């Protein structure tokens, strides 16, 4: 029986969810075992710099995986790249499990990281493009990030349980090996899935695009909804063929093109980069170390609190999934920045005056910060970045956005512990993270137009110049907004300042 309609989309969510559980598992699994005697002995008692490299090289390799996708992502399709990524994660995990030195462990994590870059670049794009109902698109992409936090939390609780298995390297080898299970489940669930209709249309395979679009809607091509969706996709592709819609280097600095593709990519890249300069990856990877070494809690207490903190992150993420479409994308991001800034500021202040009581209070502030980050800057940056990218360049734009995550995460995870361990810097390192929690607010307010309530193709209307607004393709995308008075049109968005158009330069040039 061929899976179609809502069941097809739900199967895609499950498959993508396994890929992101695998990502979260690797992000959290080492954090709970770094300080165990068994891991330290196996790795030859590595110093702080070596430990930082063991954990952070995965992030740099993930960045490399994203860059590969940005260059070749359109060649094989969304689904095939995801499966290749899962296979690489399995191979890398095997290398890691067999490690008897940090060199081999680093090599294995490089392989895992490249595969992770493939998956994190393509899974959200796949989920967004397979969503038939636009009000479900944000929830679906949000759910992927929630599943990553599920992976982190489960990994930390498994680490906590393995703490009691003294005297055997299974303390760290078993948690590392278990990532293979998630990758196998990812492959098994993605294998029978089709690629997205949008990818097939973009690569000229119209017949296959028609077939998959009918499966997505569980209706014939002559059905009004299916026919309209196809026309919108083809209209969007037609607009992207215009000469001024092509990517030009100068447009990444000041975009005067008709669809502002470069601006849209730049917006997504900077948004995700800011999110991962807020400190979340340092918290992900070194939760136990933060509680034990920097706040001064006992080993067992620190391990238990690590699991609890990451469980709180899961709950916060899931609440974000449930209420994603109740509020605008900008509302989530602005509220998150405001709340995170307050709690990070208090956290920094408490770390500056160490002691048992201030340490406990600092731990509480970290929990509060995670509650705000969980439903906002954690997932919504992915949702927004997958929203705004033009179809022909979606693999480039989104993979570069995710690459910014991995590059910024590498910087913080590698340099963060070294800076914190330096007595001349110490707690002041967290001021760096505080700064980015604060500057996130004005960035969203002035640079990120609202995208909720629009299909992926209708988002072109937000960035479209007047030069092409009167074309047949543009009018095709405007069909809903000419008939739905409840939907905010582009002109009203511009009047409110949500869309900072960059087309005035064209008028100056013409003059």
Image (tube, rainbow, N blue to C red):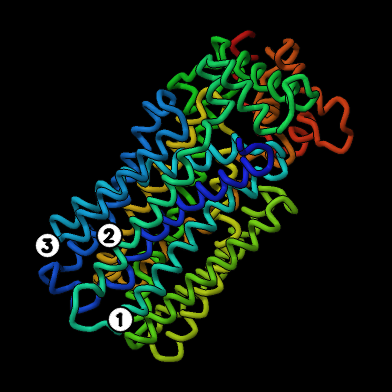
Whichever of callouts 1 and 3 sits on the residue coming sooner in the sequence is 3
Residues at marks 2 and 3 touching, judged by CB atoms closer than 8 Å: no
Which residue lies under the disc numbered 1?
163
Say above or below: 257 vs 275: above
Quarter holding the C terminus? top right
Kindly identify which residue carries mark 3.
101
Query: Is label 2 in a helix, a strand or a loop?
Result: helix
Q: Is residue 355 left or right of residue 135?
A: left
Distance between mark 2 and mark 3 Cα atoms = 14 Å
Residue 166 or residue 305, whichever sits in front: 166
Q: Which mark is residue 55?
A: 2
Residue 390: x and y, percent? Answer: 57, 27
The picture quadrant where one finds residue 500 is top right
- Density class for disc 1 (Cα within 10 Å; few <14, some 14-19, many ≥20) is many
Which residue is rendered at x = 41% and y = 91% of the image?
Answer: 356
Q: Residue at x 69, y 45 (%)?
A: 136
Instruction: Place residue 28 in its image quadrant.
Output: bottom left
């Amino acid at each position: 029986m061929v899976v179609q309609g809502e069941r097809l989309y739900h199967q895609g969510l499950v498959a993508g969810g396994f890929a992101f559980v695998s990502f979260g598992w690797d992000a959290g699994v080492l954090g709970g075992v770094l300080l165990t005697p068994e891991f330290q002995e196996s790795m030859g008692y590595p110093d702080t710099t070596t430990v930082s490299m063991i954990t952070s090289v995965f992030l740099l390799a993930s960045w490399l995986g994203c860059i590969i996708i940005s260059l070749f992502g359109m060649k094989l399709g969304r689904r095939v790249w995801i499966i290749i990524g899962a296979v690489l994660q399995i191979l890398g995990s095997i290398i890691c499990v067999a490690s008897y030195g940090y060199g081999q462990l680093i090599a294995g994590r490089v392989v895992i990281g490249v595969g992770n870059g493939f998956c994190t670049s393509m899974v959200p794009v796949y989920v967004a493009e397979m969503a038939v109902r636009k009000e479900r698109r944000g929830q679906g992409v949000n759910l992927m990030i929630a599943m990553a936090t599920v992976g982190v939390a489960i990994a930390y609780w498994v680490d906590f349980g393995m703490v009691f298995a003294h005297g055997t390297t299974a303390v760290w080898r078993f948690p590392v090996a278990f990532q293979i299970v998630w990758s196998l489940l990812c492959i098994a669930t993605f294998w029978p899935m089709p690629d997205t209709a949008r990818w097939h249309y973009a690569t000229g395979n119209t017949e296959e695009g028609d077939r998959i679009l009918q499966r997505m809607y569980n209706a014939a091509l002559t059905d009004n909804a299916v026919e309209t969706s196809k026309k919108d996709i083809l209209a969007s592709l037609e607009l992207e063929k215009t000469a001024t819609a092509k990517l030009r280097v100068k447009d990444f600095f000041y975009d005067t093109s008709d669809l502002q593709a470069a601006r849209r990519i730049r917006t997504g890249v900077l948004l995700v980069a800011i999110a991962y300069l807020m400190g979340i990856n340092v918290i992900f990877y070194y939760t136990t170390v933060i509680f034990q070494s920097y706040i001064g809690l006992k080993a067992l207490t620190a391990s238990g609190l690590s699991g609890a903190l990451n469980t709180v992150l899961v709950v916060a993420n899931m609440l974000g999934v449930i209420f994603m479409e109740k509020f605008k994308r900008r509302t989530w991001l602005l509220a998150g920045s405001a709340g995170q800034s307050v709690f990070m500021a208090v956290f920094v202040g408490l770390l500056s005056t160490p002691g048992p009581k201030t340490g406990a209070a600092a731990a509480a502030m970290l929990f509060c910060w995670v509650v705000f980050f969980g439903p906002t800057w954690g997932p919504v940056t992915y949702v927004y970045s997958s929203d705004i990218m033009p179809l022909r360049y979606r693999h480039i734009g989104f993979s570069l956005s995710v690459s910014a995550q991995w590059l910024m995460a590498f910087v913080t995870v590698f340099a963060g512990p070294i800076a914190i361990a330096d007595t001349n810097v110490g707690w002041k390192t967290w001021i760096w993270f505080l700064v980015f929690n604060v500057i996130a607010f004005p960035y969203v307010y002035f640079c990120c137009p609202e995208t909720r309530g629009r299909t992926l193709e209708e988002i072109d209307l937000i960035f479209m110049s007047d030069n092409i607004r009167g074309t047949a393709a543009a009018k095709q995308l405007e069909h809903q907004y000419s008939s739905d008075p409840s939907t905010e049109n582009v002109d009203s968005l511009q009047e409110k300042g949500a869309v900072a158009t960059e087309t005035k330069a064209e008028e100056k040039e013409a003059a």
